């Protein structure tokens, strides 16, 4: 079922989870072990992230280096199908521009459609690890907007090979990313919102946000979206803080602030188990306030900490 239909039919705030494919070498049971404790909360859907390949330099026996391409977390599409099969729950694979030509994208979308997957989260993707800024694949998309337009085209039966006759249309529900604290490359919030509105005007069904730790930023972002004429659901993305080192890693990686009250409490902790308690309490308070405000879905980035998210959702 499409995410937007889940939202339309819901009488209360829904729950959704986001997971990463396992590192190559770990089996599908790594995913099931992660999800098993979360399934009692009946998530409306589960997102599975997409990780592009990276170039690394591998040392050879003669001490020279060879450039090799590796993918550490392959399998997004198949994991989505396995989750649907095992738990009978809808899934949302992430689809990115990076590393894909338009032909690769069309094939990936057809694979998802054949697997019975109704949803995609349409993203640009970050720069490859060895690049300082995002470089599109030759013959690929530069912005999420362009990728979204391709998905919408396929939903209208428009394929890359225009001479195809009697084509069947896909029915993907499309989500796009939004940034309550601005995307790091955007010169200002206003420009970022204009670019977000272009995605909605092109047909995005809903927005899911980057993580944030201060609900005021989410509410201000949602208000700014409405003032900009964006009417689709805005879904908050939430993540627990569970270690002291995340105080620097999270702002550096995701370009979001940690509120002073939260960082002060974390810095008082002697061990990470104590940080986890502070992070759980903070996430619960955030979740309760957002639910009370009537957000359509609480979307949790579970990233290796399903028990923390489970403790929060149980209390809601
Ligand atoms: P875009 O919407 O293309 O925006 C990127 C930047 O370009 C913004 O600054 C925007 O303002 C600007 N821009 C957009 N359109 C134009 C235009 N026409 N002209 C000029 N500027 C423009 N990354 C992954 O690799 N895999 C994942 O699975 C993944 N999942 C994510 C899930 C969520 C909920 C979020 C919030 C992010 C996720 N990311 C993921 C990270 C994401 O790919 C990065 O944040 C990326 O840098 C931007 O992606 P976007 O889709 O927001 O890009």
Image (spheres, rainbow, N blue to C red):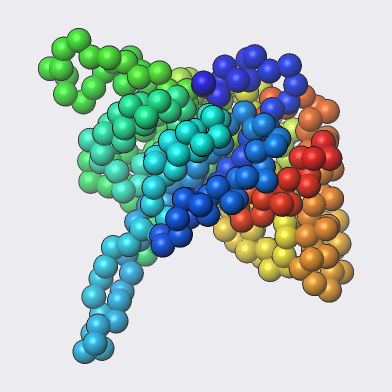
Rendered position, 23 above or below 6:
below
Q: Which one is nearer the viewer's eye here, 262 or 113?
A: 113
Q: Residue furthest top?
A: 166
> Does residue 117 appear to the left or right of 86 in the view shown?
left
Residue drawn at the location 73% of the way across and 60% of the way down: 242
Residue farthest to the bottom, as pictured: 62
Tell me where residue 29 appears, x and y as whole percent.
51, 52
Q: Give the left or right position of residue 41, taking residue 18 as reference.
A: right
- Where residue 207 appears, x then y in whole percent? 57, 30
Q: Residue at x 32, y 15 (%)?
A: 169
User: Between 316 and 41, which is closer to the camera in this rendering?
Assistant: 41
Above-or-below relation of 51 to 300: below
Q: Residue at x 27, y 47 (%)?
A: 137
In the displayed structure, does residue 72 sit left or right of residue 64?
Answer: right
- Locate residue 103 relative to residue 277 in the image: left or right: left
Q: Could you tell me which residue is drawn at 47 percent across and 33 percent down?
A: 85
In the image, 253 versus 192, the foreground residue is 253
Q: Which image quadrant: the C terminus?
A: top right
Report x, y in % for residue 181. 65, 44
Q: Quadrant of residue 171?
A: top left
The image position of residue 175, as x and y in percent, is 51, 29
Query: In front here: 38 or 177?
Result: 38
Is residue 79 visible in the rendered image? The answer is yes
The image shows residue 229, relative to residue 50, as above or below, that is: above
Q: Quadrant of residue 55?
A: bottom left
Confirm whether residue 260 shows in the render: no
């Amino acid at each position: 079922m499409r995410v937007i239909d889940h939202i339309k039919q819901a009488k209360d705030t829904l729950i959704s989870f986001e997971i990463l494919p396992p590192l190559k070498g770990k089996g599908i049971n790594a995913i099931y072990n992660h999800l098993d404790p979360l399934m009692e909360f009946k998530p409306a859907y589960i997102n599975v992230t997409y990780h592009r390949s990276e170039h690394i330099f591998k040392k050879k026996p003669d001490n020279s280096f060879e450039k090799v391409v590796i993918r550490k977390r392959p399998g997004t599409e198949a994991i989505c199908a396995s989750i649907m099969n095992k738990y009978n729950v809808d899934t949302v694979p992430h689809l990115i521009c990076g590393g894909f030509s338009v032909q690769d994208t069309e094939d990936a979308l057809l694979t998802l459609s054949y697997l019975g997957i109704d949803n995609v989260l349409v993203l640009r993707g970050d720069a490859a690890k060895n690049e300082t800024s995002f470089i599109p694949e030759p013959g690929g998309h530069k912005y999420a907007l362009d990728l979204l337009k391709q998905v919408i085209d396929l939903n209208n039966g428009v394929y890359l090979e225009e001479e195809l006759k009697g084509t069947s249309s896909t029915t993907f529900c499309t989500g796009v990313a939004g940034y309550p604290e601005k995307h790091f490359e955007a010169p200002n919030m206003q420009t970022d919102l204009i670019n977000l509105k272009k995605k909605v005007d092109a047909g995005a069904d809903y927005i899911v946000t980057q993580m944030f730790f201060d609900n005021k930023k989410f509410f201000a972002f949602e208000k700014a979206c409405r003032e900009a004429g964006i009417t689709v659901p805005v879904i908050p993305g939430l993540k627990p803080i569970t270690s002291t080192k995340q105080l620097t890693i999270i702002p550096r990686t995701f370009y979001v602030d940690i509120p002073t009250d939260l960082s002060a409490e974390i810095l008082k902790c002697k061990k990470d188990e104590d940080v986890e308690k502070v992070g759980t309490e903070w996430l619960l308070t955030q979740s309760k306030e957002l639910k009370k405000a009537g957000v359509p879905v609480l979307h949790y980035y579970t990233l290796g900490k399903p028990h923390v998210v489970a403790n929060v959702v149980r209390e809601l």
